[in-house]
Image (cartoon, coloured by chain):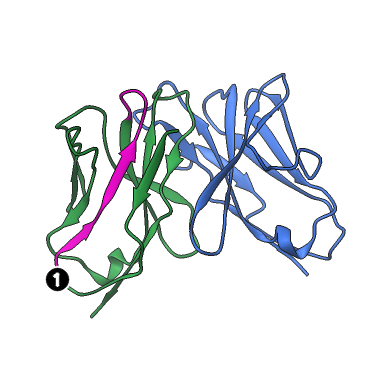
Amino acid sequence: GDSVTQMEGPVTLSEEAFLTINCTYTATGYPSLFWYVQYPGEGLQLLLKATKADDKGSNKGFEATYRKETTSFHLEKGSVQVSDSAVYFCALVLSYNTDKLIFGTGTRLQVFP
Amino acid sequence: GAVVSQHPSRVICKSGTSVKIECRSLDFQATTMFWYRQFPKQSLMLMATSNEGSKATYEQGVEKDKFLINHASLTLSTLTVTSAHPEDSSFYICSAPDSHSNQPQHFGDGTRLSIL
């Protein structure tokens, strides 16, 4: 079945370090891909998205490129801040706006000053 | 502002109590809503798909009689945890697809349920 696999956390970094959180997917069709972020005590927020191969989603300094050949959508940021500490979820949907989202298990990021 | 309102945000109650959680779409109609449960180690599990005017579709392993879902209107879905026990303590999140949005779904802020 369709699934999303993320690297296990927690990921612990110092401020201004480079971040990569790996995400790979398995899907029967042509999914749209997303990264969601959950700050402590809050709900999910859409961070960025890509709807087709080679698209790059970006927001708040985060980037992820839809790689069909490697079925990946890795999240990167060049210089993390303490305020980026949160749980990050990779997700896919097969039918935009109508279908359920399939989430990875989430990766906790902890950034220290 | 929020486009999906989830209420209450936090519930603490005794074992055996039934708890109702509401999920409302504020400025759009949602014929479908999704209910997720988030476990302590972060994973987000889809529990069921709520369908306006018809029965909910439950994921495998989710007890229909324990988690009652009602989608009585195009803007409201409710999840009732019946006779809740400590193992039902969790973070419950709803979402609703919006065909006019650039996001696939809008999420509620979640409900933290704690059963004593």
A49 left or right of B18?
A: left
Please state, as top left, top right, bottom left or bottom right, where the C terminus of chain A lies in the image: bottom left
The colour applied to the residues of chain B in this rendering is blue
Q: Amino acid at mark 1?
A: Glu
Which image quadrant for residue A11? Answer: bottom left
At 29% from the left and 67% from the top, the residue drawn is: A83
Q: Residue furthest top?
A: B53
What is the x, y in percent for residue B48? 63, 36
Give the extent of the magenta segment.
Answer: A18-31
What is the x, y in percent for residue B88? 72, 58
* Foreground pick, A25 / B16: A25
At 47% from the left and 37% from the top, the residue drawn is: B106
Residue B60, above or below B54: below
Judge whether residue A28 is colored magenta: yes
A76 left or right of B22?
A: left
At 50% from the left and 64% from the top, the residue drawn is: B41
The colour applied to the residues of chain A in this rendering is green
Q: Which residue is mark 1?
A: A16
